[in-house]
Image (cartoon, coloured by chain):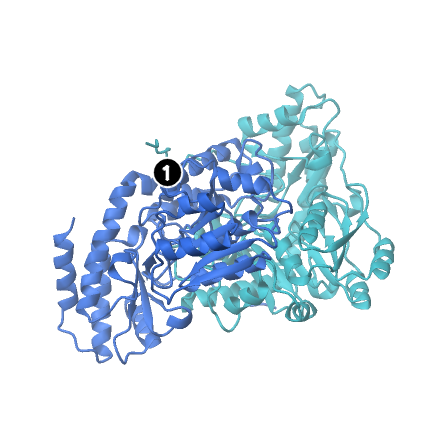
Chain colours: A blue, B cyan
Amino acid sequence: MITIPPALQPPSRLLLGPGPSDAHPRVLRAMATPLMGHLDPAFLVIMAEVQEMLRAAFRTSNRLTLPISATGMAGMETCLVNLVEPGDRVVVCNAGFFSNRMVDVAQRCGTEVTEIKRPWGEVFTFEEIAEVVRRVKPKALGVVHAETSTGVLQPLDGLGALCRETGAMLVADTVTSLGCVPVELDAWGVDAAFSCSQKGLACPPGLSPVSFSQRALDVLHNRKTKVQSWYLDLSLITQYWGQDRSYHHTGPISMIYAIHEGLRVVLEEGLEARFERHRRNYRALRAGLEALGMRYVAPAAHQLPELNAVYLPAGLEDLPVRKRLLEDYGIEIGGGLGELKGKIWRIGLMGCNSRADVVYSLLGALERVLVQFGVVVAPGAATAAAQQAYAAGN
Amino acid sequence: MITIPPALQPPSRLLLGPGPSDAHPRVLRAMATPLMGHLDPAFLVIMAEVQEMLRAAFRTSNRLTLPISATGMAGMETCLVNLVEPGDRVVVCNAGFFSNRMVDVAQRCGTEVTEIKRPWGEVFTFEEIAEVVRRVKPKALGVVHAETSTGVLQPLDGLGALCRETGAMLVADTVTSLGCVPVELDAWGVDAAFSCSQKGLACPPGLSPVSFSQRALDVLHNRKTKVQSWYLDLSLITQYWGQDRSYHHTGPISMIYAIHEGLRVVLEEGLEARFERHRRNYRALRAGLEALGMRYVAPAAHQLPELNAVYLPAGLEDLPVRKRLLEDYGIEIGGGLGELKGKIWRIGLMGCNSRADVVYSLLGALERVLVQFGVVVAPGAATAAAQQAYAAGN
């Protein structure tokens, strides 16, 4: 016989890693809402509202804009399986853990992938991308807008026009950018974008918002083969989210409640105010981390404010420090992925966690822990630097 | 500018369709729990507890037993994409909407599918399955244990031995059976099973529990090709759920909280008591529906207690009746799928909704609505019949 485990006794946590970030209290309350049917007329209204708010967040008028019923990585797979077919060529700008995954996912679709590689933490120039895209003439160009493994913001300017010129679909990973920094699907000419619920939107993980342009819909409708994933087949999913409302899978009701409330919070604040808040708290955090002697992985001009990837102070071990932060202060920060494992920390200030009081909590705790591990720091120096940067403010 | 929609104002609902069924109040409360990181040591304990409780619910010792981070249909896809490769032969017992989907999903894996067909609502004999499996010698045999479109319970007895004899993997859809009727993965020799969270486990939709036998793991580890879905690749997912705890995707924290509490509720009641409760309330409902002149789709000996598919009374239209039930009484029942659309209703008594008071609510409301639509019924006859059957009880 099994021994039934006790009820959940979650420890108190402040989630400042690469995600999940804390869900907004209003979102948590929405999660406890009793269910309704996934075809209930009242639920269909909620779905339409979620789509309309997602369009506003993505800054797009794309009709096909909806949350996929799975986490962010399923959004990446959704964009690729729907747009490419076996034998197609795909170009991926690869300078991080998540662009590396895009290569893997594209290859599993039977495509021939050309990688444009740069060391992790670097940014691609328009020219080097254009050279390869014009030469290879791929079906899709995959770019990670916000690379969660390095903190790099990759500009997408010009890539939409380039893809129109060469007949490619522009696929953008906005998992860590949506709701934190500007994402302009229509202005940039992005054909397929995917994101997540648990970062800039301050919801629990479990949904992946995606958006497809009319060009991308045309490609989808002119496929020669069926989409290899039944669950992620947008030609079926849109029959549920579209006019037909015909059953595909059972929508994750509670998560739709959550993103409905999360998007309301985002839009009530206003996107521009939200972006500015993320930038301001980032400047404060950055000043504090630099006062502690830490160096960023990404060039400053291309640093994501919501995800700070910094090298560990010399001689320090990764895990013991993070363990101390978690156990003594309830604060979670993230370690490095892949080739940066053990070398960097990833500190997130996302959604409702991008606040000055959060910055001070983290810096005060981190400074103490570093001192305990033998790093020489003037007490309070990090906080003082952050306060000054915050006051310099807008 | 977008007009921000108002906060959720969900109507009161009693969910008696094919699923989602209502989530247990304790599960709803768990959903509102603040997040922790998906690699937090405290979360890893919760994951291990969920696995252990799922094994108890599935009655298996399979190490690979875990919830996939997506809804039930993704579980079907998970079982197939991991076990079969392009060119493999698959046999599917097809007598309903969901077995039909299994054919589609298997074909999208590039397999050659042989269907054993029966009219919807019928049950396959062991002999007819054995004849085809021995002749075709497939890589996998797909069977729907509980067919949600017809209410049929398909016995799996003998199929495990048959599959061992012929070298096939036995894949079972237990979406509508887990937590409602006995599911005996080990005793039956099932190699890959999938289910959902929103029916017998009384959680919101969003997870798909799956379980793989050692034989299935061997097949997975000896594949010649990569699993075509990155998101559903169990060789990667098990690195997160297994000893390594290495990052694959961001687990849906809140849904894991939910299923943790949902499984605690299931095991506190006890599986046998739970099955008996489902049978007893089914007998009451059946007596009531038959008193209203309704006829079941499935043969009585193979009727699922948790899902009652019944033909509409002659001359009645489907949608207006269900609309009236929903609007006047807040009660949702389901319509038919595919070839049974407009012809049947599907009435679920699942998880925490399998209760005598729920049976009386439904019968009282349905009887009144039927009278309003011109069906001749002696007032209270349905309830009286249900009361009598319930009292005859255990």
Tell me what residue is drawn at x 65 percent, y 49 percent. Answer: B176
Q: Chain of mark 1?
A: A
Query: For the residue labelled by badge 1, is the local secondary structure a helix, a strand or a loop?
Result: helix
User: Is residue A134 shown above or below B240?
Assistant: above
Screen quadrant of the N terminus of chain A: bottom right
User: Is residue B334 shown above or below B166?
Assistant: above
| B151 on left or right of A15 | right
Res. B339 image quadrant:
top right
Horizontal and vertical percent for residue A247?
60, 39
Res. A222 image quadrant:
top right
Horizontal and vertical percent for residue A47?
47, 37
Tell me what residue is drawn at x 19 percent, y 64 percent. Answer: A288
Q: Which residue is mark 1?
A: A56
Q: Nearer the viewer, residue B125 or A109?
A: A109
- Quick check: can you spot residue B364? yes
Task: Estimate how packed mark 1 is, as few (under 14), some (14 to 19) or many (20 or more) residues with alpha carbons within 10 Å.
Answer: some
User: Is residue B329 shown above or below A125?
Assistant: above
Horizontal and vertical percent for residue A333?
32, 65
| A269 on left or right of B271 | left
User: Is residue B370 shown above or below A224?
Assistant: above
Horizontal and vertical percent for residue A111?
57, 57
| Kind of residue indicated by mark 1 | Ala
Q: Nearer the viewer, residue A188 or B75?
A: A188
| B71 on left or right of A93 | right
Tell me what residue is drawn at x 68 percent, y 35 percent. Answer: B336
Res. B368 image quadrant:
top right
